[in-house]
Amino acid sequence: MSSQTSEGSGSFAGLAADDRVAAQLYTDPEIFDWEMEKIFYSTWVWVAHESEIPEAGSFKMSHIGLQPVIVNRDRKGNFNVLLNRCRHRGASVCEVPKGKANGFTCPYHSWSYSLEGNLRGIPYPDGYEGVAEKKDLPLQRLRVESYNGLIFATFKTDIEPLSDFLGDAKIWIDRFMKQGAGYPVKVQGEHKFRFDGNWKIQLENTTDGYHFPIVHRSWMASVDAETADMLSFMTDEMAVTHALGNGHSVAVMVPDHVDLEDDDGTEELQERFRHIIDELSETMPQDQVRRIIRSMHGAGYNLNLFPNLSLSMSFFRVLRPISVNETEIQHMALGLDGGPESVNRERLRIHEHFQGPFGFGTSDDSEAWDRVQRGAVANPEMPILVNRGLGREETVDEGWKTSHVTDETGMRESYAMWKRMMGNDN
Amino acid sequence: MTTETAPEVASIDNRPTPDTYEPGLGQLAQPLVGRAIELIWREGQLLDDKKYEEWQTLYTADGKYIIPVDPDTDDFDSSLNMVYDDARMRHMRVTRLVQGYSMSAVAAARTSRTIARFTVEDLAEDTVTLRSAQVLVGFKRDKFQVLGADLTHRIRFEGDDARIELKVIRLVNSDAAVNASGFLL
């Protein structure tokens, strides 16, 4: 596991083994640059949820790796992902994080583009006669596909369809969206923060059940006993992590809430939601009240989609690499589109309690990740261990490598994909 | 193409005449306002000193402490906030910050904050609402952090007693990345 970075991109794959990776993966800027090329610019990257761009003309700014993009919905209802870069002299054509527009006009020389990215207008066009044609200069459009509300884009025209890339993760995406309890899931708001560490430190954390009672002890101490019980998975044999292929994995923390439609009626609804149960029961049948209340904490698992999205219980975690030692995280709170106001408000309060820069959970996670980056520079050739649970890992009927949720099966899956992509000659 | 001279440009003013602005000066001299400012500065000192248990006693029983994400909203209930604390949440937050289980609180930056630019937004018999600007400098592991914010405090008076009924901290970067911290604003 020595440094092979000077020998070219293909040799990076040697830095990741089945049960360990070199700490250089967190610290080497050259590896980071190649990750942008070989991972972020070579596969499907999540850019938006449908609910963020609900109408014709709705747009949001997003990123693929280091590159700024605009995601929008055009009048035909299609999603477009455009590089946020004027074809003239490179200025960004949009600096409004989210909104509605008929198109995008560069502020520098007023070149204007349609929602589809077509160049519509150039002021004083006579200077371009015989020099340039508008049809040749659209905003660069990326390939876009969506699955169950999740919009992904890629620079690559020749890679597999999104559906194939997601593979068995689709089963878990479908289950995740059931927390809408009959309503579509919508993004209600988001927290954003940065930490001084490599993006893969956060990628690993999403399926790291092992850290939970330690890093989040202060959060556990602050919630009601029922919620704390719900997340007491350390010795629960049903709490497992599955490797789903293509770098994706799922960590099941609340086995009874894997499929929220699956309800034998024995689970007592949490008393903390009594005021909402009473309110909803005035107008709703009991089974629907149960659906909504059982979904309040979201699905019973974190689904890690390689490389940048996680569907984590009741929110989306989006990671954005900034540099080898800086990463931006968004935590998007989810709610029920058209659902009861009181339910959506309660979901916001649950989100605020754990997530965000002042959340009882996030601030401690962030501190732990900073500490990994600080420590990993001490002999960066010394391996990072991801071998926990290797001795008890099994393959279940679905073909998924599976071990306890406190084991590092999910991280091994991520790094197997990392190794595959970093070794590719694409 | 002709170009206007500077005096010609200066003479062109097609803007509507602005409404008369009433700056409402003179209120800082009101005794309640002086007491409110004193309380706000006392609060800042307790927070910089991380004396959170004393700090929470500055609030009324129904007092709210809010760090919103949306710079424009006053409907905190229906919005995602960074902090939206009533007495119960505030109490849990203080417990978390002082009990020693939270690694970010244990390793929190040292802070020093300056609160200035006070304006009186509302002055009633027993309530004063003040806006101010806060610049907080934090230092942790060889790095400085600056957090700028617009503060709104609503202070309620009962005889000699003064408590914070509402504090809204609007960070200048509230809707961008705000780095996770182990201290309070």
Image (tube, coloured by chain):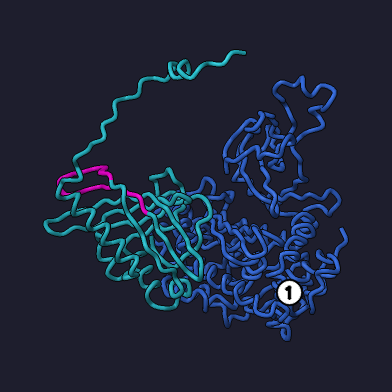
Magenta span dominant secondary structure:
strand
Q: Is residue B126 magenta?
A: yes
Residue lying at 27% horizontally and 44% vertically, measured from the top left: B119
| Above or below for B68 versus A84 | below
Which quadrant, please, contains the N terminus of chain A? bottom right
Q: Residue furthest left?
A: B159
Question: Could you say where residue B89 lies in the image, as x and y percent from the top left?
Answer: 36, 64
Circle 1: element type: helix
Q: Amino acid at mark 1?
A: Arg
Residue A258, placed above or below residue A288 = below
Q: Which residue is mark 1?
A: A412
- Residue B36 pos. (x, y %): 22, 53
Residue A317, percent across and down? 60, 59
Figure quadrant of residue A130: top right
User: Which quadrant of the rendered structure holds the C terminus of chain A?
Assistant: bottom right
Chain of residue at mark 1: A
Q: What color does chain A have in the rendering?
A: blue
Asked whether A15 or A103 is in front, the reply is A15
User: Picture coordinates of residue B165 (x, y %)?
Assistant: 26, 55
Q: Colour of chain B?
A: cyan
Q: Is residue A7 left or right of residue A34?
A: right
Position of B69 compared to A23: left or right? left
Decide whether residue B125 is among the magenta residues.
yes
Assess disc 1: are there few (<14), some (14-19) or many (≥20) residues with their C-alpha within 10 Å of its C-alpha: many
- Left or right, B150 with respect to A138, comes to left
Q: Is residue A376 above or below residue A258?
A: below
| Span highlighted in magenta in the image | B119-134
Q: Nearer the viewer, residue A205 or A223?
A: A205
